[in-house]
Image: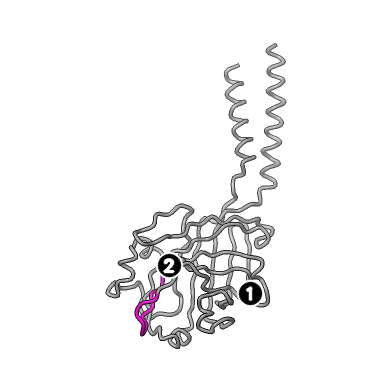
């Protein structure tokens, strides 16, 4: 009876080991776990909207501020009246939101061999830009970076930024995009061009190049349920052998 048990355990262990290697060999799914974005805004376009100056808050400062603090005109930004190199950071999957804010988390996964064909979820970006205008304060940020294949027409790449600061609405589409995918993440760079469903379309700016962007994502292999199952089974078999 003992020989039969050992043989059975050996066979199951072989299956578990095979599953482990098979899963590892096909583990191309990546999960975004960090990165950053930089925006260069065309100040002449914003000035034409009577948004004459701005205060920018990077992720480190803005992610800890309440909405009341950010919208207080006496709260200084990290930079003031600077329109290029505005920094944003990739948020973790789980992030706490200060009062009045809803900070987006990062859930994007993709297959490293086909980024746009497999991208699922969102990339949450910390950072906010507050504009000072004739009608008072206007602020955008706390972006979600999303991909939608139906938006990939003409110069548009399918990647776009959705504003969640104060109101949810599409802000900029990524156009004329250059993409580079590596084993540890991917990069995107190109132009900021509002699509017809952007709130900037209300100002007649559909299709207008409003600036540039550069984005870098770091990613790690996503642990699959099959791999976890194989590891759990291998551990169970090891414990049973030791008991035997």
Residue matched to label 1? 156
Is the stretch drawn in magenta largely helix, strand or loop?
Answer: strand
Q: Is residue 224 magenta?
A: no
Residue farthest along the left direction in this orientation: 74
Mark 2 element type = loop
In the image, is residue 96 above or below residue 133?
above
Q: Quadrant of the C terminus?
A: top right
| Nearer the observer, 35 or 203 | 203
In the image, is residue 130 above or below residue 205?
above
Q: Position of residue 75 (x, y in %)?
A: 29, 72
Q: Is residue 215 found left or right of 155 in the rendered image?
A: left
Mark 1 element type = strand
Residue farthest along the front direction in this orientation: 202
Q: Quadrant of the N terminus?
A: top right
Q: Position of residue 48 (x, y in %)?
A: 45, 88
Q: Is residue 132 magenta?
A: yes
The region drawn magenta spans: 128-138
Number of other residues with Cα within 10 Å of mark 2, as a class: few under 14, some 14 to 19, many 20 or more: many
CA gap between label 1 and label 2 equals: 24 Å
- Residue drawn at (38%, 74%) of the image: 130
In the image, is residue 118 above or below residue 236?
below
Q: Is residue 172 found left or right of 178 in the rendered image?
A: left
Residue matched to label 2? 165
Q: Position of residue 47 (x, y in %)?
A: 43, 86
């Amino acid at each position: 009876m003992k020989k039969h048990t050992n043989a059975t355990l050996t066979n199951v262990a072989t299956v578990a080991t095979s599953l482990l290697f098979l899963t590892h060999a096909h583990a191309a799914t990546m999960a975004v776990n960090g990165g950053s974005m930089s925006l260069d805004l065309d100040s002449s376009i914003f000035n034409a909207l009577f948004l004459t100056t701005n205060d920018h808050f990077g992720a480190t400062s803005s992610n800890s501020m309440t909405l009341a603090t950010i919208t207080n005109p006496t709260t200084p930004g990290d930079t003031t009246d600077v329109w290029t190199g505005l920094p944003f950071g990739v948020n973790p999957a789980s992030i706490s939101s200060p009062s009045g804010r809803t900070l987006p988390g990062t859930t994007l996964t993709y297959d490293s061999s086909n980024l746009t064909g497999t991208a699922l979820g969102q990339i949450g970006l910390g950072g906010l830009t507050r504009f000072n205008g004739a009608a008072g304060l206007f602020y955008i940020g706390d972006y979600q970076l999303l991909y939608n294949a139906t938006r990939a027409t003409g110069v548009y790449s399918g990647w776009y930024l959705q504003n969640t600061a104060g109101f949810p609405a599409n802000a900029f589409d990524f156009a004329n995009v250059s993409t580079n995918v590596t084993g540890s993440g991917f990069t995107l760079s190109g132009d900021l061009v509002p699509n017809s469903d952007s709130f900037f379309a209300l100002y007649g700016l559909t299709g207008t190049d409003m600036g540039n962007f550069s984005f870098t994502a770091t990613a790690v292999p996503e642990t699959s349920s099959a791999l976890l199952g194989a590891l759990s089974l291998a551990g169970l078999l090891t414990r049973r052998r030791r008991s035997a």
